[in-house]
Amino acid sequence: MKKVAIIMGSDSDLPVVVPAIKQLRELEIETEVRVMSAHRIPKEAQKFAESAINHNFGVIIAAAGMAAHLGGVLAASTTLPVIGIPCSAKVLDGMDAMLATIMMPPGIPVASVGVNAAKNAALLAAEILAVGDDVLMKKLQDMRKEMAEAVIEKDRALRKKLEEI
């Protein structure tokens, strides 16, 4: 199975990406987590992206705040899917990062999830990998079924509680 790279612009982004790491581990997807700044070490970030295919990566997740050029820098250097996680910063609550992540020029796409939505980034990465992996696809289908069953049960419990009021 292909691996997923989670690249953070700063180690301060770790609390944001922990849910992605946990979700990928739960799905038994090998994950490598690194810190690479698009602005401070752009050559290293570019080199990582250029060689990612040769190191068995299937998807790259880029978590960055503020200017959030990391996803674009990585996407410019690979044809692998890149998913951006805009991280909330103190000034604009992640809106700056979201705009920097999604406003890519034609030909260099970066997918994006919501601000700090690392679990969704992991699930999107898993869905991309599952296109060619029936076992992983079944795990994702089972997860969706469990989520639906949990909501149905919560609805039952709520209706029962309301009858008692």
Image (cartoon, helix red, strand yellow):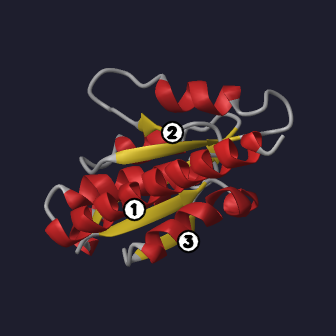
Label ID, residue 113: 2
Query: Which residue lies under the disc numbered 1?
Result: 143
Structural distance between the alpha carbons of marks 1 and 2: 19 Å
Q: Is residue 152 above or below residue 17?
A: above
The answer to whether the residue labelled 2 contacts the one labelled 3, judged by CB atoms less than 8 Å apart, is no
Left or right side of 80 for 12: right
Asked where in the image residue 53 lies, by quadrant, the reply is: bottom left
Q: Nearer the viewer, mark 1 or mark 3?
A: 1
Q: Residue at x 54, y 62 (%)?
A: 20
Query: Which residue matches tag 3?
Result: 22
Task: Please tell me which residue lies in front, 101 or 112.
Answer: 112
Whether residue 44 sits left or right of residue 127 in the image: it is: right
Q: Quadrant of the C terminus?
A: top right
Q: Mark 3 belongs to which amino acid?
A: Lys
Q: Earlier in the sequence, mark 1 or mark 3?
A: 3
Q: Position of residue 23 (x, y in %)?
A: 50, 67
Q: Amino acid at mark 2?
A: Val
Residue placed most toward the observer, 60 or 124: 124
- Which one is earlier in the sequence, the residue at label 1 or at label 2? 2
Whole-angstrom CA distance, mark 1 to mark 3, is 14 Å
- Seen from the viewer's position, the closer of residues 135 and 32 is 135
Does residue 87 appear in the picture of this structure? yes
- Mark 2: secondary structure: loop
Kindly identify the residue that appears in the image at 43 percent across and 45 percent down: 83
Secondary structure beneath label 3: helix
Whether 84 is drawn above or below 58: the answer is: above
Residue positioned most to the front: 164
In the rendering, at what x and y percent does residue 120 appear?
Answer: 50, 49
Position of 54 relative to 61 (above/below)? below
Marks 2 and 3, how far apart in space? 17 Å
